[in-house]
Image (cartoon, coloured by chain):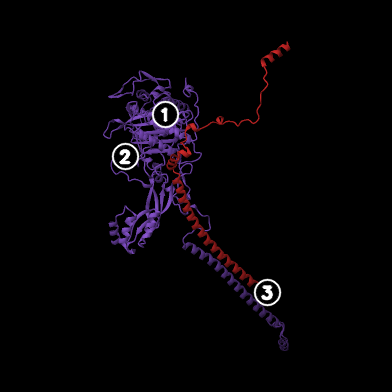
Amino acid sequence: MRGFFYVVSALVVMALAFWAYHENYQTQQALREVKQLQRQIGSAREQLGVLRAEWAYLNRPERLRDLAELNFERLQLMPLAPEHFGDVSQVAYPRPVTRFELNRTMDVSTAAAAAEEATR
Amino acid sequence: MTRTPLRPLARILQARARGENPDAIERENIRIRHERMRDRMRLRAESRLVVLALAFVMMFGAAGARMAVLASTEAEEPRAGGVGPAILATRADITDRNGRILATNLVTSSLYAQPPLMIDPERAARELAEIFPDLEEETLRKQFTGKRKFLWIKKKLSPEQQQGVHDIGEPGLLFGPREMRLYPNGRLAAHVLGGAGFGREGVHSAEVIGVAGIEKALDVQLRDPARGGTPLRLSLDLTVQAAARRVLEGGMKIMNAKGATAILMDVRTGELVSLVSLPDFDPNDRPVPLLKGDPSDSPLFNRAVQGRYELGSTFKIFAVAQALEEGIATPQTMVSTQGPLRWGKYRINDFHNFGKELSVTEVIVKSSNIGTARLAQQIGATRQRAFLDRLGLLQPVPVELVEAPAIHPLLPGNWSELSAMTISYGHGLSASPLHLAAAYAALVNGGTRVTPTLLHEAGRAVPGERVISAETSRVVRGMLRQVVQRGTASFAEVPGYAVGGKTGSADKPRPQGGYYEDKVIATFASVFPAHDPAYVLVVTLDEPNITALGETRRTAGWTAVPVSAEIIRRVAPLLDMRPEIEPGDGFGVRLTGN
C-alpha cells in the first residue's frame, strides 16, 4: 500500500513538473507573440498616421476649392450662400392620386333663396 | 526490533537466590526502556524542527531573493497589458473643432556622416551635392576628408532623397529616425499653430518642440506622455477658416491693403471659430524672423493678437454703453455736437459737421467724435478706465498663444480728462483686434465678460462677470444694427443675417510722432444676428485705399465693411445659420423708452 502511494505521488510530481514547464513555455511564447504584435501595431499606427496626414493633405480646403473650380462644368459646385437654404413649404407635395371631379354645377344662391322661401 | 523482557527469568531467579527484591529489576528495565523511548522522540522532534526551519529559510530566502531582484532591475511595465496608443506619436495631434487634422507627426529620417567609416569620401561628396542642390560639393569634401568624426548633413529627408543616399552605397553615411511635425493645411491657421522645430538632438531621436503660437504655448501639454495621444481640439473650424481667409485675401488685394486680419468669435463661449492674419506663412517651412526693422512687416507677425492699433470709432460704443449703464444718458438724450470742441490747446473735430446737437443713438449712427467726447467728459477718466478694464481692454488677452501674454495694450501715461475724451473715440489707447472682439462680445451677449479661447470644450458657456445689464446690451445691439441700416456701415447689410456693427478708421501714428495723413487702420467690428447675437466678427485692414465714385476712399465704411459683409455672407451658412427675418424695427430701443 505504501509503495503504491510512493509511486503515485512520484507520477503526480512528474505530471505537475511537465505541466509547469509547459505553462512556462506557453507563457514565453505568448509574450513573444505580444511583442511581435505590438511591433505590428506600432508599424500599423505609423502607417495610419501617414495615411491620415495624406488624407488631411489631400482634403485641404485650398485643394478642394481648386478642384471644384476646375471641374465646375461637370459638378457645378459653388460656395454655400444664404440663398441655398430652402424652406419645407417650398418642397412640392406629391400629387394626390385620387381627385374629385366636379362635373355637375349648381347655383348655390338660388338654392339658398328657394330654401328661405320655403321656410317662410 | 526485539523486545527485551521486563522480568528476565534468569536474573529474577538469581536475585531470589540472593534474597533481593526481584521487582527492582523490573523497575530498572522499565526505566531504561522509557529513556530509550524519550531519546527516540527527541531525535524525531529535532529533525522535524530542522525540516520546518529549512522550509522557513527557503520561503524567506525566496522572498528576499525576489526583493533583491526587483530592487536591482530596471522597472518594466507588464508587457501583456493593454497597448497604449503612444507607441509612436510622442507629440499629440492638433485638430479643429470637427476633428480635422491641423497638425500631425510624420516619421522621416535625418542624415549624418561618420568620415572615419567612409570608403570613398570624394565620391560621396560629389553624389550628395547632386541629390541636395543646396549643399556645396567642396565644403562636403573638406568636411569628409578633415579630422571630424561626426557631422550632421540634413535634419529631414524625403523618401526619394533617402533612396538616393542609399544608392550611393557609402557606409559612412547613416540615417537616424526622426519624427517631424506636419501641417497638412499649409498657410491656413498658420499664426494660430505657429510651428515646431527640433530641440535636443541625438542620433536615434530628437525632441520636437513648439516654436510659436499654440504649439509653444501648450508645448508641455502636447508632449505629455500621459495624454496617450489624445489630440488637442481647437475651437477653429477649418472650413470657416478657409472661407474667411479666402475672402479676406481677396479683399486685402482689392483694397490695396498692406495687411489684414479677421477674427470670428462665439459671443457666449469666447471660442475663436476663425482667426486669420495676412500676410501669412507656411508653418512647415517657417521663415526666419526679422532681426531689424519693423516686426510687423514680417509674415510671422500675428496682426490679430500682436498688432496694437488705435482702433478709432469702434470705441465709441464703449462710451455710449457706459453712459447708458450709469444713467447719464438715454438713447434719446440730446448731446451737443457743435464743433470744434476745444479743450486747452486741443480741438476735436468731426468728419462732417453734424449741426448743433444729436441724440445719443445718432451720435453712434453718424459717428460723432464731439458727441462721444462730451459723454466721456460726463463719465470722467477714472470711471472710464474702470469700465474699459472690466471689458478686458487694459490687460493682455489670456488666449492660448505664446505671443498673447506679452501684448499689453498701450495706455496713456496720465489718464487725464483729455485722454478720456480721445479714448472715447478710439485715439490714445492701442489694443489688438482680439481685445476689441472680446469687448464687443461682452457688450452684445447680454452684458457678461468673455474670455477668448482657442480650445474647444463642449458645454462651456459659463457666463463671466457682468459688465453691463442685459437691458443696456439690448439697446447697444439696437444701435449697432442702426449703424448698418442707415449709418456709416451701410455696405454691411447681408439679407437674412441682421448685421450690426461699428466702423472705425484711425490715422496711423508716425514712428516720429504725429499721424500720417494718408495711412489709416480701417476696422469694422460687427455682430450677427443683432437681435439674437451668435458671433462677433472684427475685420481690420492695414492701410487700405480704393478709388470709388471718383475719389480715393480709405474709411472703414468703404474698405473693411464690404469685406466683412462678404465674410459674413460666406461664413454664416457654413455655421449652420439660416437667413431669417429679423423682428420689427426699433426693437430693443422701443423697450427702453421712458
Q: Quadrant of the C terminus of chain A?
A: top right
Looking at the rendering, which quadrant does residue B485 occupy?
Answer: top left
Disc 1 crowd rating (10 Å Cα; few below 14, some 14-19, many 20+) is many
**Chain ID of residue with mark 2:** B
Circle 2 residue: B297
- Rendered purple, the chain in question is B
The image position of residue B567, as x and y in percent, is 42, 34
> For numbered disc 1, what is the local secondary structure?
helix
- Measure the C-alpha gap from mark 1 to mark 2: 29 Å
Q: What's the residue type where badge 3 is placed?
A: Phe
* Residue located beneath label 1 in the image: B492
Q: Horizontal and vertical percent for residue A111? A: 69, 15
With B141 as the anchor, is A36 left or right in this view? right
Q: Vertical placement of B301 versus B364: above or below?
A: below
In front: label 2 or label 3: 2
Q: Quadrant of residue B58?
A: bottom right
- Amino acid type, callout 2: Asp
Q: Is residue B388 left or right of residue B64?
A: left
Under circle 3, the secondary element is: helix
Q: Is residue B248 above or below residue A35?
A: above
In this rendering, the answer to whether B70 lies above or below B510 is below
